[in-house]
Image: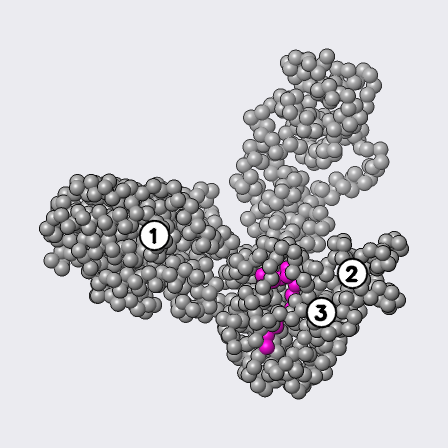
Amino acid sequence: MAARAPVSEVHRAIATALDGAFYRAVNPDLDLVAVDPIHHYAAIGWREGRDPAPWFSTQSYVAAYPEVAKAGWNPLHHYLTVGRSEGRDVVRSERAEDYLLRQARRGREPAWSFEALIAADQSAADLADASEARLCDRTLAAREFDAAFYLAGNADVAKSGLDPLDHFLEVGWREARDPNARFSVKDYLETYPDIAADDINPFVHFLEVGRAEGRVGRTELGFRYEIIKRLVPLEARVAAATRAAAGVQPGTMAVLAKALTGARTGLADLHITFSHDDYTANTGGVQLCLQREGARIAALGRDHLHVFPARPWPVVRTKGQAGHLGVLLNGKPLGVFAPGTVAGALRKAAAAVAPGRRSFAIHSLLGHAADETADIVAAAGLGAGFFWLHDFASLCAGFHLLRNDVEDCAAPPPESPACGICVYGPWRARHLAEHARLFERLALTVVSPSQPTLDLWKASWSYPAASEVILPHAVLVDREPAPATPAGRPLRLAFAGMPAAHKGWELFRELVTKHDGDPRYQFLHLGGRTPGGLPLAFHKVVVTGTRPRAMQDAIERLEIDAVLIWPLCRETFSFTAFEAVAGGAAVITGPDSGNVAAFVESSGHGRVLADEAALAALLDTGEIVELARARRKPWLYDLAFSGLTVDLLESVA
Amino acid sequence: MKVLCYSSFTFSYLNRARVLFQTVRRFHPDWETVALITDRPPPGFDFDPAREPFDRVVWADDLGVPDFAGWLFKHDVVEVCTAVKGPFIHQACASGADAVIYLDPDTALFASLAPLEALLETHDIVLTPHLIDPNDDPASIRDNDLSASRTGIFNLGFVAIRTTGEGARFARWWNDRLLDWCYDDMPQGMFVDQRWCDHVPALFDKLKVLRDPGYNVASWNLSQRTVAVGKDGAITVNGAPLRFWHFTKLGPLGDIMTRKYAGENFPVYEIWSWYKRQVAQVTDPSIPPRWWAYGSYSDGAPIDKAHRVLYRQREDLQAAFPDPFRAGGGGYRQWLERENL
């Protein structure tokens, strides 16, 4: 029977009648570039009720002659080979009218007579009215429809080859696809339920009457809205960390004791560091600092024991709250152990040799408990050491001091309304208590990489620090004047580093979008990865322990005029700011950027602007050209990096 | 000043009321807090008032409303939860408190209401208008100004009175009106307990219309209020300290109106985000969503609003069925079925 007809025969038969253009047009959800419509309809399409041509409704045929489908017979094949000669009826596709009208509007001759397809109960006048209305809608929408925007955001439409405006008017708006960057279908329908109830194209309504009525096409909520919407309560983050850490199997005291025997000096000369992760396995500012510190300790011929939470942990732990610690000896992993095991094994090993020059530095207490940390350093016979202010975890669980991840908070009083609404607020007391305990157990010299960081730290909370010292991670060393650049070329404004909201990426993205096509500016992103889809030039730049100059070299080579360093949170140091200036760029920053603002103000290498509106104005007015290399004639610098705690050990020595 | 602070709700709103009373206790541990509940705990929910963040519970059926079952049946949940505010505030005037403050369960305090207490030294009634600044654009006027014209100039998610003088006279008048005329019937000039208070400036002296933007912040007045969080940790609204927020319509509808009028004023979303976290923390999953014990007949069948309206319009039905909730033979429900209603 025909249902079992060879596939090739079915294909041959339906190929004579299937309208490929129609099939593609009315099935935008299908990837019909890769799949042939004839094959698709023969294999799947008819079973899904899709129509092969304007004149043939699969569903109507199946409904009228259920035995055909029941026998597994392709309805179109059945009609062409049997049904037609039996006088069976066909009904036109429900999509036919719209499709043929669109074709007609584009001046294309439909394959079938349009008039012949008009349903008997619909007068030609009605259809003409509908046709005219659609044409009006299309003309209106076309004025502000952004085809490039639509295709960029809807890869399926781009792939299908459909006209983007037709797609939007036919189905796109129903799928909440936006016609341009300034109009949100979802916003409009949510905000104006009367329009949603009328089932009319919201964009057309907006252009026709909505705008004149004072309706808003897109509710501008800003990037901070999205961050707040995605905020995960800290409780949930701790719970996730707890789950992730549950599978960690700690090693025994014997294993660690044996591993410690491989130490360079038998732990006689020993430097212990604590941080939030394994600095050899992760990248970032603190990790680079620890790499430098480790290298300098090695150069001194001492042993370096690094202790870190075995799994990332978002807050400090309290005594008794389970958590295992990873241990590195001279940069090599020894395994994961319980805190008591680390203290116990170290006590034994350290006692087995005459103590030499021993020291410790706490770079971060995240994932550690104060008493456990103090117990570990006590096991090496230590009680006095260094506490680094790489971040503000000693003031709050939100160690960036970024209230709800959207705004610098400046560590207000813990009982303040601001802390009351902050996702980190309920955890602040724990951080204050654990750090208070740490300062109570140990005599700690607080080391800050910058003056503003120390100032804020001291103003916000009072810990009994043994002393304080400021030690920048790097200083500028004069090199030579930067090569001259031609005047009048577009200003090169760059974003350097990770495209993260708290680093100011969203502000940069807004500027790039706003000034797309502005001949005055050229935007660049220098970093490890870029989100894509923006009119900017991306250059892959990754700073590592072995390539510490990668960023400043790139800035110098690309002759970047200015780097936007506008973190939402205050930076305790900012390598990026120093790298930018070393490479000859000016730095543009805001008032809440901590040491970035302090550095720019004290060095004069850029501008500290009052707020985001001032930043927008700087580009709008073009005043930013004052920062072009051609105007500034900058110098190039080298960066002289500190040895971190080792500098202090040596100065103490 | 001895202050009694109360809120009126059903168990569906217990989570919100918990958040409210936690904030009241934080800023005013000396106030007496009362939960006025027009409901019964759902099966499977262990309601222990001693573990709740309020001092005591008053059940609506203990307010002494005559023919309580029939009276209650005339109202839907919003109508009755607002109606009972009248008898309670009236009775509270004789409770020994110097002042009574009503706060909707979906409000929360962000700072002390000490300035309000100070106002009550010189005024007997304090009301907060929905709007303290007019809107200019048509959409905002439609959503906010005209809405307030229909539903009431003052938002009755808050009212504060002294228990003597004009405050007591107001409480008595409001009690009287709400016992008989607390319906959502805008064509008749009623919007539950709220529209009545449009008369207050005309009927009473010693009224303070509190035009401080830090009070009763809500989606309907966000178009004219800007929220900021300072480095000192203060939250301000148009420069004034934020006192309390009205988190009306927790859910998609509230979100839409908030987004529409807050725009890029992101502290508004921080505050809402905080509120949602708080509510989620104190939500008891054993209370079914939209639970209301008086929302159904004794056999569990839901009560149509139309059946409540019919009952309140027909004195003969009220006389014939003094307990209209009762299902079964000879009951109101059976009568409705027989009448094909």
Figure check: B250 above or below B125: above
Say which residue label 1 marks. Answer: A367
Q: Residues within 10 Å of mark 3 (few under 14, many from 20)?
A: some
Could you say which is closer to the camera, residue B204 or residue A213? B204
- Residue at mark 2 to residue at mark 3: CA–CA distance: 14 Å
Say which residue label 2 marks. Answer: B325
Please give the chain letter of the residue carrying mark 1: A
Indicate the position of residue A422 as horizontal and vertical percent values: 45, 61
Please give the chain letter of the residue carrying mark 2: B
Queried whether the magenta region covers residue B14, the answer comes back as yes
Please tell me if label 2 and label 3 are on a single chain: yes
Q: Which amino acid does label 2 sit on?
A: Phe
Could you say which is closer to the camera, residue A624 or residue A214? A214
Picture disc at residue B236: none
Indicate the position of residue A250 as horizontal and vertical percent values: 31, 43
Residue B205's quadrant in the figure? bottom right
Magenta segment? B4-16
Figure check: B167 above or below A12: below
- Residue at mark 1 to residue at mark 2: CA–CA distance: 59 Å
Residue B32's quadrant in the figure? bottom right
Say which residue label 3 marks. Answer: B61
Q: What residue type is labelled 3?
A: Asp
Q: Which amino acid does label 1 sit on?
A: Gly
